[in-house]
Each structure stands twice: as C-alpha cells, then as structure tokens.
C-alpha cells in the first residue's frame, strides 16, 4: 500500500506466543499463521496446545513452508523459560526466534482483604513473572554480542508484552491483578529505553561485536476479551467490579488480535484496542514513549479532562455501593 511501510512483517519469521493455547494468545497464533509465520505456542496444558497447533495448520498460508510447534511449560519458573528459548532455537535450525509475544496470564479478581495474601502473590507470579521470565530468557539470548559475520539479514526482532488497560486506571476488585499489569508496563517502559543502548551498538556492528539484530519492544493494553479466562473471572468477580467496568464492551479474541497486529504493523509502542482503552491510556501516558507526539498529546489533554470526572465517579459508585449493600458477608442496610 502506498505510504504504508509494514513494521511487522511476519512472513517466514519464527514467533513464540506464550499463552498461545487459548483466548487472545490463540487468536494471535492463528492470525500470524495465516500471515505466513512459523509459530510456537507455549502454555501448561498439552491437550489445548495440541488443538491450537491443529488449528494453526488448518489456518496456515503455506502448509509446506510453515512449521508449528508446541511446548508445555509453566512460565512462572524462569528455568522453564530458558528451556523454551533453547528448544525453539534448536527446532528453528539453530536460530533464535524473531518475535516473542507474552500473552500468558489470567485474572483472579476479588477485594483486597478477602483474597488470601498468597493468592495475591500467585497473581504476581502468573501475570508479572511469566512475562518477566520470558523477557529475561529471550533478551539474554538476543542481546548476546556476536561478531559482524554473525549478523542477521532481516535485522529486527520484536518483544511484545500483553498488559491491560487496568495498568492505567484503577477499578475496585482488581487489586490481585492490576499491580502485576502495572509492573509489566513499567518493565516495558524501562526496557524500551535500555534496549536503545543495544540498538546503538548494533548500528555500529561493522566495527565491533554487537547483538545480532535490532530489537523493538511493544505492549498491548486490551479491554475485556471474551476468552475462557474471562468466563472464569466473571464467576468470581464482585458485583461492584462488574458495575464499575460497565463502560467496557468486551471484544472477541480475534478482534483484539487483529487490531493489535495492525497497530504493530504501523510500528506502535503502547497499543490499545478501542476508544475507551485509548482514553484510559491517554490519562496515564506520562513519561511513556509516544506513538505520535501530536495525537498522543491531544489525547492526553482530552483524557485528563474526562478523567477529572471519571475517577470521582468511580469512587462515588463504590461508596454508594457500600452504603446500599454493606460490606461482603454483612447483611444489607434496610
Ligand atoms: N480476558 C480479558 O478480559 C483480558 C485479558 N488480558 C490479558 O490478555 C492475556 C490473554 O488473556 P485471555 O485471552 O483471557 O487468556 P486465557 O485465560 O483464555 O488463556 C490464558 C493462556 O495462558 C496460559 N497460561 C496461564 N498460566 C500459565 C503459566 N503459568 N505458564 C504458561 N502458560 C500459562 C493458559 O494455558 P494453561 O492454563 O494451559 O497454562 C492459556 O493459554 C492475559 O495476559 C490477560 O491477563 C488483558 C485484558 C483483558
Ligand atoms: C469515556 C471514558 C470513560 C472511561 C471509564 C473507565 C471505565 C473502566 C473500564 C474498565 C475496563 C477494564 C478492562 C480490562 C479487563 C481486564 O484486564 C480484566 N478482565 C482481566 O482479565
């Protein structure tokens, strides 16, 4: 297309998708398979992984050229993440993956004091540590200095995190989950700066050892996704939380995958998937690198005005809820 340079061409690339056996991760896997990528899906449950591989094969652009693999691993364990990268590299004829997309994780909502403290820690393991472990194993591999003769021909790699708009805006009932997503956002912002040192060294690769490729970091911030994980969280979600997130109209996994991939193709860094999500991002953009200085600055001015009203409104709704219903387990005021 005229004037459009695809910043995320996956044809013939090797992609690892954690959490690729369900929900958004599986939708991403299917879409990238249709675009001609070799895809490795990683999650714990083998039966779901087998199904995902079958579906990717059926969806492939070229069944003869593309390869698919699944690896069962619990990514809360950093040793497992290193095994995943090593196995993928062996399978990929000795070359590291070109793209790693962290999608693993699920939400277990509840009020802060009602959720046992070890469950809060477990959410941090499931959300933050699966992503940080994967990023650590991946970047250690990608950023290893190699001699000029070992440099890649298609010199760009992508590390993608999947966060949530809850990293931008607080909603009561998500305290086990939102802090872990906010930590991912902070990791992403920090890495997006740190990676520039390596990319700078890469730009001088003809002179000295440098990483084998340029690396770009991206983070996706979906709103609700109609996934199996979402069905589970709805069963335990406090009624107040459902009420406070009424402005959210959940999207299907394939919608979210498609919108995210299109934004990656435009080269965006922090990616939202609909208008309410963009407004939530706008109010919290702060020091994060921008996709477009003009558009993001206008967006944050607008969002900050909107949120002058939104935050007190959310707090008032919580207060009114308690006034009406009491705290969970108590008998309501009559
Ligand atoms: N659903 C929603 O409303 C929203 C979700 N998100 C985020 O988007 C991402 C995808 O969510 P969703 O589509 O709901 O996903 P699902 O809950 O439907 O699927 C989660 C995937 O992660 C895998 N997984 C979970 N824990 C681990 C682990 N310890 N090690 C390896 N794999 C693991 C699961 O497989 P298995 O259990 O077999 O390991 C599965 O493949 C998540 O990061 C989620 O937090 C963000 C905003 C909204
Ligand atoms: C005009 C602008 C008004 C903005 C109002 C703000 C409303 C907040 C909506 C909260 C939506 C939360 C979606 C994230 C879901 C998620 O990550 C979990 N389902 C975990 O899986």
Image (cartoon, rainbow, N blue to C red):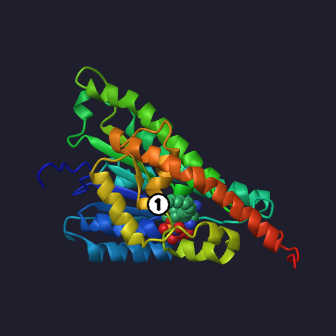
Residue at x 47% of width, y 54% of height:
279
The residue under label 1 is 276
The answer to which quarter of the image holds residue 34 is bottom left
Residue at x 17% of width, y 50% of height:
4
Determine whether 202 is above or below 273 in the image. above
**Disc 1: CA contacts within 10 A as few (<14), some (14-19) or many (>=20):** some
Residue 181 visible? The answer is no
Residue 300 visible? The answer is yes
* Residue 147 horizontal/vertical position (percent): 28, 28
* Residue 68 horizontal/vertical position (percent): 33, 66
Q: Quadrant of the C terminus?
A: bottom right
Residue at x 87% of width, y 75% of height:
333
Of 155 and 63, the residue lying toward us: 155
Determine whether 173 is above or below 151 in the image. below
Left or right: 78 with respect to 328?
left
Q: Is mark 1 within 8 Å of ligand 2?
A: yes
Of 110 and 149, the residue lying toward us: 110
């Amino acid at each position: 297309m005229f004037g459009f340079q695809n910043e995320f061409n996956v044809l013939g690339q090797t992609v690892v998708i954690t959490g690729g056996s369900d929900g958004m991760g599986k939708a991403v896997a299917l879409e990238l398979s249709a675009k001609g990528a070799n895809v490795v899906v990683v999650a714990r449950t083998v039966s779901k992984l087998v199904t995902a591989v079958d579906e990717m094969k059926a969806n492939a652009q070229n069944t003869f050229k593309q390869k698919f693999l699944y690896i069962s691993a619990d990514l809360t364990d950093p040793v497992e993440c290193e095994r995943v990268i090593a196995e993928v590299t062996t399978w990929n004829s000795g070359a590291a993956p070109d793209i790693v997309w962290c999608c693993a994780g699920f939400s277990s909502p509840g009020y802060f004091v009602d959720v046992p403290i070890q469950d809060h820690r477990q959410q941090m393991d499931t959300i933050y540590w699966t992503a940080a472990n994967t990023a650590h194993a991946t970047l250690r591999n990608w950023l290893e200095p190699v001699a000029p003769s070992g440099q890649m021909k298609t010199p760009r790699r992508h590390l993608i995190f999947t966060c949530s708009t809850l990293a931008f805006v607080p909603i009561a009932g998500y305290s086990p989950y939102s802090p872990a997503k906010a930590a991912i956002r902070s990791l992403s912002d920090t890495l997006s700066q740190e990676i520039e040192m390596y990319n700078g060294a890469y730009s001088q690769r003809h002179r000295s050892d440098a990483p084998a490729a340029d690396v770009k970091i991206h983070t996706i911030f979906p709103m609700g996704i109609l996934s199996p994980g979402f069905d589970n969280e709805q069963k335990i979600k406090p009624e107040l939380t459902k009420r406070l997130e009424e402005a959210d109209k959940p999207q299907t996994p394939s919608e979210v995958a498609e919108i995210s991939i299109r934004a990656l193709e435009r080269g965006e860094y922090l990616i939202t998937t609909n208008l309410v999500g963009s407004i939530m991002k706008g109010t919290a953009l702060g020091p994060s690198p921008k996709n477009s200085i003009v558009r993001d600055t206008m967006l944050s001015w607008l969002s900050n005005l909107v949120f002058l009203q939104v935050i007190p409104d959310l707090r008032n709704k919580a207060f009114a809820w308690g006034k009406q219903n009491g705290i969970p387990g108590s008998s309501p005021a009559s």
